[in-house]
Structures are given as structure tokens and as C-alpha cells.
Image: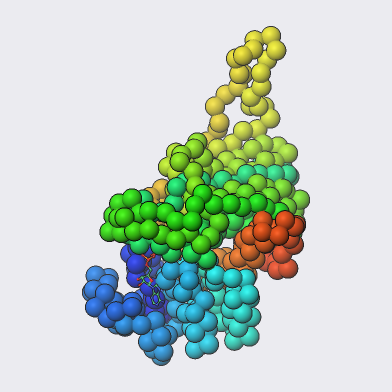
Amino acid sequence: MEPIRIGVIGIGDISDVYLNNLKKYDAVKVVACASRGLEKAQRKAAQHGIPKAYASGDEVIADPEVDLILNLTTPQAHFQYNLAALQAGKHVYTEKPLAATFDEGRQLAGLAREKGLLLGCAPDTFLGGRLQNLRELIDNGTLGRITGGGAYFVGHGHEFHHPGPAFFYQPGAGPLYDMGPYYMTALLSLLGPVQRVCAMATKAGETRVVPSGPCEGQVLPVDVETHICATLEFACGAVVTLTCSFDVWDSELPRLELYGTKGTALIDEKDPISGPNLFGGDLLLRTPEHYRWRDHDRAPEVVGEPWAVVANAHPFNSVSHEENPRGIGLVDMVYAMRNGRAPRASGDMALHSLEVMECILRSASEHIFCEPSTSFERPAPLPLDFPRSEED
Ligand SMILES: NC(=O)c1ccc[n+]([C@@H]2O[C@H](COP(=O)([O-])OP(=O)(O)OC[C@H]3O[C@@H](n4cnc5c(N)ncnc54)[C@H](O)[C@@H]3O)[C@@H](O)[C@H]2O)c1
């Protein structure tokens, strides 16, 4: 079968990870890339053996030999190119968030549906081995009914490692829209849609200074909330705490944990910018027979065993930020198109995620509960032998 021909818009920090990965799959071929300057695009094209380079996103979209646009621009440009690509009859897979506002996201989902085009959205880390392993614990009943959970991303922003961090403090980003989608998508893929939200939010300051790197000393305006605490009630009944912050000078977090009637499962990381934004890593489990409790006769000794590490047979277990399988959501979408099934990293789930995030900010600013209007089908688990199973 002929590969789906991909045109990439935006060739910054994350692009090499995608371009290296997509080379591994015969179902897709990157045929063009674009930046806001021809020279940069030509350099990237030469580096990755991409046949065509363009000086603007619009030129890639206009190329009749491109079937699908991979949008790796900064969040503030997602809507513009996603919309133009769909209008031009191209399928779209975009980095998160789907758009900067729910209204824009809804326009994209409506247009894709109307035109019969596929719309997919990162993150695809929920397809990684660790979260698929957690999904298995839910589906096979090990955890029982999920009653609650906690999802905590805390750190002090991306200006410590990103070469151009200004966009992280503009609407469409901030800790909620930048890192929140990893936690939100993990939760949505595991628990299904959210039915009610309440939240509070604040920020540590109106500006931040880049401490090092190419933008050292640059003063960044902070036009978003940078410390957000939300409570999410899922339609399945689970009530989950979500915290997303760029205002924390270290913590024992991040962490994502789910509380079931038969046990607790959690992922925790020592690296502050890791968590469900990694594909692999340990999944820990504690069941009632290993419950830790304080024996009144032997206090203060805590009785119990260490957390059990759950055995993992799932693919995609990278624990590196630099080398990881980002893009498998796109590959899955291409197979979905060929095999007439729903894509897993779907536009519908991304739209719901965007709406929930907007509900969080609205709840925080208006001091109200908010109920999302959208829903989605929970994505099917990823087969253990993906993508070979798709080719049978
Ligand atoms: N950097 C990471 O580690 C990382 C990880 C996962 C996801 N992401 C996501 O990937 C996306 C890109 O992030 P990045 O870190 O690569 O950003 P970046 O700033 O390094 O690169 C963005 C690219 O988009 C281009 N661009 C921006 N606005 C444009 C416009 N209007 N027209 C054409 N091109 C435009 C820039 O020229 C640049 O090539 C974001 O949505 C981000 O959330 C980044």
C-alpha cells in the first residue's frame, strides 16, 4: 500500500523526535516540511532526507502531493494551520492543544466531520506501555471500580531548558494547556469523559526572566494562570484532583494515581518534567492485602511491603525525552483510516480535553461549577503487537 504523504509545519524543538520516529513506519512518509524561512526548512529537509522544503505553512498545505498535515507549530498557530489544512482537504494531526480555545476546536472538529477528514491530536503518550498497562489493570478488574485519583504536574516552567520559552506563558499554553493535556488525556483515555468541573487558579507573577540558554535575561510576560487546582468529576463516577503549576520550586511530585475499590495504581517520577508525558516507566500497585497501616501496639512503625511494580508486556516504553515514540498516534490514525476504525488519539477526545481545560479556567474565574457539553468514545487499548496487527 502507498504511504500517506505527510507535510510538516513547524520544525522546532520537538520536530526531530517526530521525524526520526516516522521513518520507522512504512505506512507514512514525510514528503515536505516548512518553517518561517526557507533556509531553516532546507536544513531540516537535508538532515532528514525530506524531498521538499517550503518557506511557509501555507505552501505545504497547497502542495497537491501532501495528504496529511503534521502541525508542530507553537500552540498559538495551531488553529490557523489546522483550519487551513482541513479547508484544503488534508487530514490533520496536530501537537497539543488542538486549538487555543474550545470554540476554535469545535470549528475544526465540525469541519473535519463535514469533509470526511481525519483529525488527530497529541499527546499520544497514553499509548505508551505504562499507561496501557494501567488501562489493563482497570479493564481486567484488578483495581475494582475507580472512585478517585490525583494528577499533579508541578515544576518551575520551561524557561530552564527550552530554547524559546516565551510561548509557554501565552494563552493556549501555560501549565494547564501545555502540560495539562498529558495528564488530562491519560485520565480521559482511562476513565472516559468528564461531566463536571470546579477549579481555582492564580499566578506567582506578571513576568518571568529566562535564567539561561539562547534567551538568557529575556523578560517574559505571563498572560496565563500558572498555578491551577481543579476537581474533575468523571461520568464513570470517579472524582479526580488535577494540579498544574509552573510556580513550584521542587516537590516530591509529579504523580498520577488512581484509587480503585480493590487497589491504588500510580506512576511517580523524580524528574520534575516527567510523568504521563513519558511513554514508559514503572507502574506501581498496592492492593488491600499489602495495605500499609500503623499497628497501635507497635506505633510508630508502619507495617507493610513496598509498592509492587506491575509486570508490563506492552510496547513503547521509552523513558527518554529526547528519544521517544511521539507520532505513534499519527501512525495509528493512518491505520485507522485504512482499516475503517476509530483513531485512538482522536480529535473528539482532544476537543473534550480542550473543553474541560476551558471549563477549569472558567470555573476558576467565575467561581462556578462547569459542565462540558462534548463527549467521546474511550479509545480502544493498543494491541500488544501494534502496528503488525493492523497489517493482517
Ligand atoms: N519541545 C518539547 O519538548 C515538546 C514536547 C512535546 C510537545 N511539544 C509541543 O510541540 C509544539 C511545538 O513545540 P516546540 O517546543 O517544538 O516549539 P518551538 O518554538 O521550538 O518550534 C515551533 C516551530 O513552529 C514554527 N512556528 C511558530 N509559529 C509559526 C507560524 N505562525 N507559522 C509557521 N511556523 C510557525 C517556529 O518557527 C518553529 O519552527 C507545541 O505545541 C508544544 O506544546 C513540544
Across and down, in percent, residue 40 comes to 26, 74
**Residue in the picture at 59% in, 81% down:** 112
Can residue 258 be seen here? The reply is yes
Across and down, in percent, residue 301 comes to 60, 14
**Residue in the picture at 51% in, 49% down:** 204
Taking the image as shown, residue 192 lies to the left or right of residue 332, namely right
Taking the image as shown, residue 191 lies to the left or right of residue 74, namely right
Residue at the farthest top position: 297
In the image, 81 versus 16, the foreground residue is 81
**Residue in the picture at 67% in, 56% down:** 364
In the image, 86 versus 344, the foreground residue is 86
Taking the image as shown, residue 42 lies to the left or right of residue 164, namely left
Total tally of numbered discs in the picture? 0
| Residue 276 in the image: above or below residue 82 | above
Across and down, in percent, residue 118 comes to 55, 77
Can residue 339 be seen here? The reply is no
Across and down, in percent, residue 348 comes to 63, 70
Image quarter where the N terminus lies is: bottom left
**Residue in the picture at 66% in, 22% down:** 293
Residue at the farthest front position: 206
Q: Based on the displayed image, in which of its 4 quarters is residue 116 positioned?
A: bottom right
| Residue 145 in the image: above or below residue 15 | above
Q: Based on the displayed image, in which of its 4 quarters is residue 29 positioned?
A: bottom left
| Residue 96 in the image: above or below residue 151 | below
In the image, 26 versus 273, the foreground residue is 273
Q: Quarter containing ligand 1?
A: bottom left
